[in-house]
Amino acid sequence: MKKIIEDRERLKLQGRVRVFKIWLYNILENENSPYNQIYNVFALFVVITSSIGVLIELTPLEAKLPPDLDSFLREYEEIVLIFFVVEYLTRLWVISNFTDDFKRAYYAYEKPDKLSKIIFAVKEAFKPKIQWMRTPYAIIDLLSILPIIRPLRAFRILRVLRLLKIIRYGGAIKSFIFAIKEQAYLFLFIFFTIITWIVIFSLLVYIFEYNAGNELFVSMWHAIYWGIVTISTVGFGDIHPVTDPGRIITSIMIGGGIVLVAALTGTFSAALVSRLMTLKEGGLKMENLENHIVICGWNETAEEIMEQILSMKIEKEKPVVIVTNLPKSAIGIELPRDIFYKRGDFIQENILMEVGIEKAEHVVIVAEREEGLSERNIDARTALASMLIKTLNPDAHLYVEVLLDEDADIFQKRMRVREVIIHGQILGKIMFTSILNPGATSLIKTLVDKERGIRKIKVSGLGKFANFGELLLYTRQYGYLPVAIERRGKIHLNPKDTFILEKEDFVFLIPAGGGED
């Protein structure tokens, strides 16, 4: 019993580490994560501010930094270097799971020699990390942290290369540029109107002041400088008109300038707000997602699935996307930031492509009801979505919910859908079973419970076993009971001990419950 408890505690600790690792991955590497967007803004600030010293050194101006500023920038650069070293090592850690890759390669290697298996497994486990180290971003990261080695600081180019990291953290800049692009015509119109306004009124004032002998207006460029400072309401006072016509024109210029500058600021603010609302209301494109879960449609089934995902924190391990015609406010539950929401019709190819359907691992299609659609029509929409998804991603694990019994066979036999659930059928069977066998409902609920429920694991991930009997003896040592084997989509429930196991088989395990030894 003590061993089982220790094993459970170890698994819980591993689970916490895994969730923490995925959380860090979402911050550092997942471009679709809101945490990554926030981190990019922070990292962009750090990169730019830590490069001030080297940028000043590169300027042709003969300007020396004050001693206190020079000392602060050098100490700040030291701290930033350490920060980016930690960031680089963290990225290297989260980019792949070394333990899982090692185990997978170890059991897949055919040769019996243990040392050869270990060497092969280590090489395979390091492959994803080495591949990441060869990417352009990773090379930039490595070069930018080399000045942590003091002799290399003599090479100023290495310090300058840190500015290339701006490309990596360009997510925030992209949003800024996208907002400007959306209102590009209006921006250009107001911007050039302001320039024209400044030039015309500045030159008019310059003419009057020049003729009045105002020595403050030395040239037309001084006049334009005065116009820019004045219209921005800064007003340094180093240049000012002394004639009455000049002051009247200045007053008109300031009045119109306030309106134009406010219009430019308001347009920019509206563009940013529009961008944020687009993201909030499901306008985000998520083509970069990989190995994620896509839920097409929304009803009570999808809500139950989502609640289970949130309770088991699956969204921390892999991205989850909801695609529905319903507005976000009508979903009925508060979606955390880790859950992506896309508003649109999941039978449209462009909508599916925007949620990265071609790289999704699991796709669930629920029977989303719409006004004016019969049950037959809803199942027809599900069929259309299934065929489209299978065309775009033949390897996706597809699960569908249908409303009519006769449609279930069509999905399973003709569309190669992994799982078909007939709406209300399972619930009815559970209730009938409970009538015949009181307590059966509690048993079923226990089997699917998030803490004590069934686990599905690949047999080769546990070791090599000739038959089910050997697997049974092995798993019982660790407090688990194998109840079924899945082979090529077919379930073999409680097979005989002599049942021969194959390399690609999966086993369903029930963890040990309460009780005393």
Image: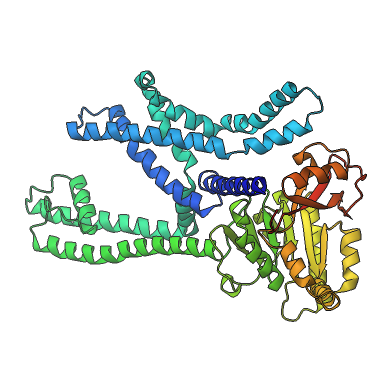
- As drawn, the residue found furthest toward the front would be 517
Residue drawn where x is 44% and y is 60% of the image: 272
Residue 350 position in % (x across, y down):
69, 58
Residue 13 position in % (x across, y down):
57, 47
Which of the pair 98/256 is nearer the observer? 98
Q: Is residue 405 left or right of residue 171?
A: right
Q: Is residue 431 left or right of residue 41?
A: right
Q: Is residue 171 left or right of residue 296?
A: left
Residue drawn where x is 26% and y is 56% of the image: 198
Which of the pair 32/4 is nearer the observer? 4
- As drawn, the residue found furthest toward the bottom would be 372
Vertical placement of residue 27 versus 382, above or below = above
Residue 134 position in % (x across, y down):
58, 29
Residue 458 position in % (x across, y down):
78, 44
Which of the pair 98/384 is nearer the observer? 98
Residue drawn where x is 19% and y is 50% of the image: 223
Residue drawn where x is 66% and y is 27% of the image: 122
Q: Is residue 496 visible?
A: yes
Q: How many marks?
A: 0
The quadrant in which residue 243 appears is bottom left
